[in-house]
Image: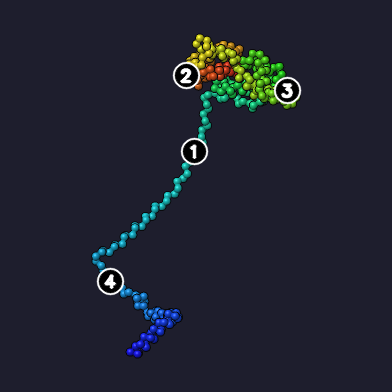
């Protein structure tokens, strides 16, 4: 009994020291863990035994390997490239146009032709098909006659300037001609340089002549005559416009031009080509003035 008590008190004493002295407790724990670590683990070091099947499993048929793809056939030998096709024959020259060639190109703005012999007179067909180009030719010839020194300008005070413009336009007197010239900005600017003389170049000369090919009063009077009861209509039918242009050209009576029935029909066909079913006064004015331009241009073209 005393021995049991002795062992019990010894155990109690050790436990008491363990609580007060941690080193004794950790040493004891560490010793136990070291003992466990020193024992080899058969579970980690001994691999599991594998059972090798010696008989085939007949439950699932073996997968047959797929047959290899047939070898690609060798392409036939590449034929030699074909010979290059022969070069196409040279293009034939374009056939000549059946319509007449346009009139000689216009001289530069403000300049007349080099000489009057350089210009070919336009034909009737050229006048009808390209009036502007034909006017450039015939008016350049007139301007060159007023500028023998080839200065490319004519003084406003030149004695032949006003008569030449009056003879080839609808302007009736020199006062009207001077009014047109002096209202042109280019003419006024020309007097601000040099000796102060105002000059007219080819561009100004051409503009005054073609914009006044017919008198404005004649254009308005004919339009009023085409209306009902002598009143100025807002518009007229295309056939009435054609009739009015016929009377207008007949009344112009430009010397040197004979308007045959055939020539008159050709002029009217050209003028009415783009006209609509109805013609307004705003359209009538340019048509009548263009009709006068055609006749005046024909007058300057030798037959």
* N-term mark: 3 or 4: 4
Can residue 49 be spotted in the picture? yes
The x, y position of residue 100, in whole percent, is 54, 23
Which quadrant holds the N terminus?
Answer: bottom left
Q: CA distance from mark 3 to mark 4?
A: 128 Å
The residue drawn where x is 35% and y is 78% is 42
- The residue that disc 4 covers is 53
Q: In the displayed image of the protein, which residue is found farthest to the left?
A: 59
Residue 115 appears in view: no
Judge depth for marks 1 and 2 and give the one in front: 2
In front: mark 4 or mark 1?
4
**Rendered-image quadrant of the C terminus:** top right
Within 10 angstroms of label 1, few (less than 14), some, or many (20 or more) residues? few
* Tag 3–tag 1 contact (CB < 8 Å): no
Q: Are marks 3 and 2 in contact (CB under 8 Å)?
A: no
Label 1 belongs to which residue? 88
Secondary structure of residue under mark 3: loop
Q: CA distance from mark 3 to mark 2?
A: 50 Å
**Quarter of the image holding residue 10?**
bottom left
Give the colour scheme shown: rainbow
Q: How many marks?
A: 4
Instruction: Say which quarter of the image contains residue 57.
Output: bottom left
Q: Left or right of 198: which side holds 25?
A: left
Label 1 sits on a secondary structure element that is loop
Mark 3, residue position: 197
Q: CA distance from mark 4 to mark 1?
A: 83 Å
- Labels 3 & 4 near each other (Cβ < 8 A): no
Regarding mark 4 in the picture, which secondary structure is present there? loop
Give the mark nearer the N terminus: 3 vs 1: 1
């Amino acid at each position: 009994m005393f021995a049991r008590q002795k062992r019990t008190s010894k155990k109690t004493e050790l436990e008491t020291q363990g609580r007060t002295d941690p080193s004794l407790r950790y040493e004891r724990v560490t010793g136990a863990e070291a003992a466990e670590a020193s024992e080899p683990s058969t579970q980690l070091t001994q691999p599991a035994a594998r059972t090798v099947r010696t008989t085939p499993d007949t439950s699932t048929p073996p997968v047959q390997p797929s047959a290899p793809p047939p070898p690609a056939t060798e392409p036939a030998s590449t034929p030699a490239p074909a010979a290059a096709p022969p070069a196409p024959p040279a293009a034939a020259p374009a056939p000549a146009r059946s319509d007449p060639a346009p009139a000689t190109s216009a001289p530069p703005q403000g300049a007349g032709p080099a000489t009057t012999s350089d210009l070919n007179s336009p034909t009737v067909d050229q006048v009808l098909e390209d009036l502007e180009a034909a006017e450039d030719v015939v008016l350049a010839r007139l301007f060159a006659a007023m500028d023998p020194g080839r200065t490319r300008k004519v003084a406003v005070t030149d004695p032949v300037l006003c008569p030449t413009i009056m003879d080839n336009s609808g302007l009736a007197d020199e006062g009207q001609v001077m009014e047109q010239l002096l209202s042109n900005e280019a003419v006024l600017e020309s007097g601000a340089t040099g000796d102060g003389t105002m000059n007219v170049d080819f561009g100004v000369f051409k503009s005054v002549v073609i914009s006044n090919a017919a008198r404005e009063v004649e254009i308005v009077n004919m339009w009023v005559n085409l209306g009902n009861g002598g009143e100025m209509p807002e518009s007229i039918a295309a056939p009435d416009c054609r009739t009015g242009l016929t009377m207008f050209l007949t009344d112009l009576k430009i010397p040197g031009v004979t308007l045959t029935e055939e020539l008159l029909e050709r002029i009217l066909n050209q003028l009415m080509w783009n006209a609509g079913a109805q013609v307004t006064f705003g359209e009538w004015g340019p048509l009548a003035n263009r009709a006068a331009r055609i006749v005046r241009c024909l007058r300057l073209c030798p037959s």
